[in-house]
Image: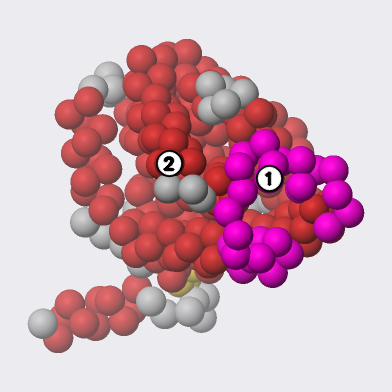
Amino acid sequence: MQTTDNAQASRRRPGQWPEVREIALADLLEVLAAGLLDFRAAPLYGLGLAGIYAVGGWLLVLLLVAFDLPYLVYPLAIGFALIAPFVATGFYAVSRCLETGDPPSAQAIVRAVRAAFAGDLGWMALVTGFSLFIWVDVAAMLFFGFFGLRSFEIAELLALVFTTPMGLLFMLIGNTAGAVIALAVFSFSVVSFPMLFDRRVDFVTAMVTSVRLVRRNPRAMFVWCAIIAALIGLSLLSGLLALFAVLPLLGHASWHLYRRAVGPARVSA
C-alpha cells in the first residue's frame, strides 16, 4: 500500500507534466485532413456513433417541446459543444486502432472506452457535464429575467427573441455568457479527453496540460475553437443532420491534434 501511495505521489509531482508543443495554423489543417482520412477509412463506425448522438438530440428537442420548455432547446443545443470532446471518445478508439494498424471493431471500441472510464475519464466527463448544467441554469435565469415565468408558443418565442429590442439584447447577453463558459471549458478540455483515453493520468493533470497547451498556442487554439463552433453551428442549422459528418471529422481530428500537441512527461528538477 505504501509503495502504491508513493508511486501516485511521484506521479503527481508538479514537475512531471507532459510536454506541450507549438501548434501552427497549418497543423490544424493537417489534423482535419487526418480526421477526414480516418472517417473515410472506417465510415460505418463514424456514421453509427454520430447517429447515436443525433438521434439523442432529436429526442431531447421533442421532450423539451412536449414539456413546454422550448426556451431550453437553443441553450442545450449550443451547450452540446461543451460535451463534444466526451461524446467523441468512440472516435478516439477508432483512430487509435487505425494508427496502430489494428482493424476497428465494435468489441475493440467498447473495450477501449470501458477501460478509459475505469480511469479518470469519468471524472472529466462529470466536470464538463457540470459545466453544461451551469450554462443551462444561466440561460434559464437570463430568460426568466427578460421574459418572466410565463410560457410561450414556439412561433411567439421566436418572434419575441428575433424581432424585439429586448429579445435582441437577451440574445447578445446570453450568447456572450455562453461564449465565456465555452472558452473556459474548451481551455481545460481541448486535449484532456483524448489524453485520458490514451494515458493513465489523473484528470487534473489532463486539465492542466490542456490549459498549458492553450496558453502556449493562443492563436492556433482560438482558431481551433472557432472551427469547432462553426461546424457545430452548421450542424444546428441543418437540424442536426450535419452531425453525421461533423462529429466523426472533429472526433478523429481531435485525436490527431492531441497526438501532435502533447508529448511525453518531462520531469523537472
Q: CA distance from mark 1 to mark 2?
A: 15 Å
Q: Is 128 rendered above or below residue 100?
A: below
Q: Nearer the viewer, residue 171 or 36?
A: 171
The residue sitting at the left extreme is 1
Using the rendered view, name the quadrant where residue 36 is placed: top right
The residue sitting at the bottom extreme is 2
The answer to whether residue 147 shows anywhere in this view is: yes
Q: Is 140 rendered above or below residue 80?
A: below
| Residue at image point 26% right, 59% down | 119
Report which residue position mark 2 lands on. 66
The residue under label 1 is which amino acid type? Leu
Report which residue position mark 1 lands on. 157
- State which region is magenta: 140-166
Q: Nearer the viewer, residue 61 or 133?
A: 61
Where does residue 41 sit, x and y in percent of width and height?
42, 14
Left or right placement of residue 149 versus residue 216 in this view: left
The answer to whether residue 227 shows anywhere in this view is: no
The residue under label 2 is which amino acid type? Ala
The mark nearer the N terminus, 1 or 2, is: 2
